[in-house]
Image: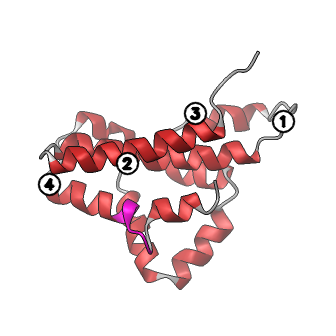
Amino acid sequence: MSYGMKRSDLQGMAESKLSDAILLLSHLKPSNAYYLAGYAVELGLKACIARQISHETIPDKDFSRDIYLHDLPKLVRLAGLDKDQKTKLSSQPEFAANWAIVMEWTPEARYESHQMADAQYLIGAIADSNHGVMQWIKTHW
């Protein structure tokens, strides 16, 4: 019996949420687009974490609990990406600017109203093909 989600499922959901966010933005639904775009980053980071979990090994209890948090910096640490991220932030100002935009997202965004510009900035920061946050995540998942 298998429990939980597979890394490939998390990858697919991350890509799907980002795609849905772009579609919602194109249909002038910025609040939902904003929320889904941030959720795509969360799912992408969780796919990176899934890569760290060894088959037939029970992870540490705190590690397992923390995976379910919506704290992006903590998810970066759990995925083992904090050193790579620090290097990238200091060497690529475009990525640093995109990460700063992504850090404004919280799961509470689902209860908030967001303007088109907010959603455009967030989706751009995530989906940028050269310096986007999702591009970086995909190199590690």
How many labels sit on residues? 4
- Quarter residue 97 falls in: bottom left
Name the side, left or right, on which 34 lies relative to 60.
left
Farthest top residue in view: 1
Real-space Cα distance between discs 2 and 1? 29 Å
Q: Quadrant of residue 47?
A: top right
* Viewer-side label of 3, 1: 1
**Quadrant (top left, top right, bottom left, bottom right) of the N terminus:** top right
Disc 3 + disc 1, Cβ < 8 Å: no
Q: Residue 68: which numbered mark, if any?
A: 3
**Which of pointers 2 and 4 indicates the residue nearer the eye?**
2
Identified at 22% across, 59% down, the residue is 120
Q: Nearer the viewer, residue 35 or 55?
A: 55
7 shown above or below 102 = above
Mark 4 vs mark 1, foreground winner is 1
Callout 4: SS: helix
Mark 2 or 4, nearer chain start? 2
Tell me the CA gap for discs 4 and 1.
43 Å
Q: Nearer the viewer, residue 59 or 11?
A: 11
Circle 3 residues within 10 Å: few <14, some 14–19, many ≥20? few
Q: Amino acid type of disc 4?
A: Met
Q: Residue at x 43, y 67 (%)?
A: 132
Secondary structure of the residue carrying tag 2 is helix
Residue 45 in percent (x, y) is at 57, 49
The mark that comes first in sequence, 4 or 1, is: 1
- Reading the image, the residue beneath label 1 is 55
Q: CA distance from mark 3 to mark 4?
A: 29 Å
Instruction: Give, as a single range, the part of the protein colored magenta.
Output: 125-130
The image position of residue 122, as x and y in percent, is 31, 58
Q: Give how far apart the Cα atoms at labels 3 and 1 are.
A: 19 Å
